[in-house]
Amino acid sequence: MSRLGVSVSVAVVTAALSACRAEDSVPPNVPSLAGGSASVAGNAAGAAGNGSGGIGAGGGGVGAAGGNVTGAGGNVAGASGNGGGGVAGTTVGAGSGGAVAAGSGGSPPGGTARDADCDMNGIWVVRMMSVTEALTLEQCGSIYYYLELKHEGENVEVVNQFNCGIEGRGSSNGSLNDATLRALMPSNSQSPRKGTMTKASDGTCQFEMDRFWVVFGADEVTYAPSPRNAEIPFTQQQSSKPLPTTATGAIDFENDGKPGMAIVVTGVISGIRHSVQRATYVWLTNNRYKIMPSLDWAADIEAYADYYGEEIALQVEPEDAALLSAGANPVPTAQSARATFRFLGRNASDPRVAAMVVSADPKADGALLTCKNIIKALPPIEAISTGFGQVCPCPGGDMCM
């Protein structure tokens, strides 16, 4: 079995799980709002009670503690609260069909960053680009996350997070269907992954998040090290807990009757690859990826993605599609590998949050729409053609020099 068993077609998808960086994104960012951090996970700020009201995207409202509020054309934006008085519900948007962010009352803890212009407190969406190589051609993949971060002093902590899928681009395209995405969202929780963000001596913001290990299509407890930020060689984990090479040891990730996680491949070759995957990565600034201080993060920020992974194909459809089982290798320390962070706001009242986040509960139906909004806002990275092949771009969409 290949180390990152990705076919020429599927390498594109698994590229989302391998070391590479995403191309620059230029969209405008959200101005930060003063105040505490209220969770998009549908938590109403009750003045005297723990309300479970949620914020509906484009039509929901903030539910008062103990009461249900309906936005204009939206769905009910609150469950039940455990308290007496609450903040009266206010309309977030006037759109139609707005879903509701499911929550359990209260707000995520807000922090006070040491440096106001390096403050990571708030709600972010992330696209991490990775790179594999098949037949000497680089395949670029993007993997997506929703993050709520608390930043206290120098310390950053993930207080809420879910995965939003994989999109691959290269010789062929790869993606996840809705059933797989639903299974992926609550898996491999990064809470409470930790890191730091400080002002460096050169005036830039120095950022680093702990190493994190992920496992897809197999039992996380069995195949991921404990703790999840273990600084051990990848080969050590491979030898001590090798991924399953047959259906035995794998899980039916999306309940489709097949072992492992399903990746849908289209392009030069089409089909479905059912596989098990394991990866580890760190996000950090370096000489190529620096973060300039900002009070409102009006532009996306980027950090290097130090990534490595493996994948083993257990079954392919159609069964005679040999390329779906062919191997591709991750590109270690790829210069273009990076995570792009887009700031949505300090709390759920920011209109950019309401526009993108339908639900921040990974087990709620609305979270699937949130993920699709994130992928639309940060499109998958496309490989670029050169005189000697195909590569994944560095910032600005150019080759890494």
Image (cartoon, rainbow, N blue to C red):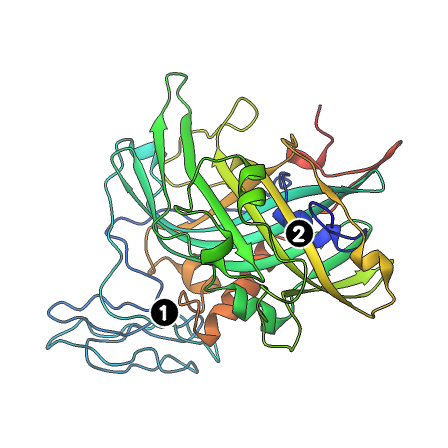
Task: Name the front one of labels 2 and 1.
Answer: 2
Q: Is residue 55 above or below residue 153?
A: below
- x, y (%) of residue 284? 47, 33
Determine whether, in the image, residue 385 is placed left or right of residue 352. right
Residue at the spot of label 1: 92
Is 336 in front, or is 33? 336
Is 220 in front, or is 254? 220
Residue at the spot of label 2: 311
Tell me the residue at 20%/77% (across/down): 81
Tell me the residue at 34%/82% (across/down): 70
* Amino acid marked by disc 1: Val
Tell me the residue at 54%/55% (across/down): 215
- x, y (%) of residue 165? 58, 59
* Amino acid marked by disc 2: Glu
Q: Quadrant of residue 264?
A: bottom right
For residue 282, say whether it is visible: yes
- x, y (%) of residue 274? 69, 65
Determine whether, in the image, residue 55 is placed left or right of residue 145. left
Give SS at disc 2: strand
Q: Residues within 10 Å of mark 2 (few under 14, many from 20)?
A: many
